Image: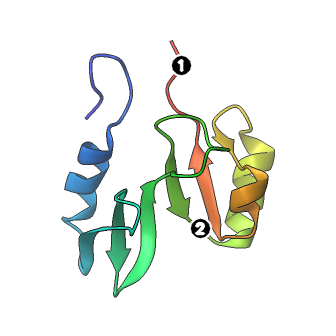
Amino acid sequence: MLTELGHFTFDMVKAVALGLNGVEAATKRDGTPVLKVGGSYMAGMAAHVSAEPDTLVVRIGMEARRLFLEEAPETYYLTDYYRKHLTCSPRPYQR
């Protein structure tokens, strides 16, 4: 499912997620696409200016987020804005 550029698009993530039980596609008030489970946020595109462009924001538990950020800071990051939320972001693909 990698594109020729070696990264995932939100449409690819959405296609996989919609195959999971209870996942639905939605749009936030600002127009950005999100995925929800049981009406609760699961993942979406970052809308805040602090995020790197084309960043996916994924809901994740606090302990898992801590481990991801400690073990793979080159892959995952968190801005101060998103720190208050139970989220983490994989870094967008850089050539």
Q: Nearer the viewer, residue 10 or 62?
A: 10
Q: Residue 18 lies in what quarter of the image?
A: bottom left
Q: Which residue is mark 1?
A: 94
Where is residue 58 drawn, in percent x and y? 51, 59
Q: Is residue 95 left or right of residue 24?
A: right
**Secondary element at image label 1:** loop
Residue receiving disc 2: 60
Residue at x 34%, y 87% (from the top left corner): 38
Residue 61 position (above or below residue 93): below
Q: CA distance from mark 2 to mark 1?
A: 23 Å
Q: Is residue 57 above or below residue 25?
A: above
Q: Seen from this angle, which residue lies furthest bottom?
A: 38
**Secondary element at tag 2:** loop
User: Which residue is situated farthest in the top direction here?
Assistant: 95
Quarter-of-image position of residue 52 = top right
Amino acid at dot 1? Gln
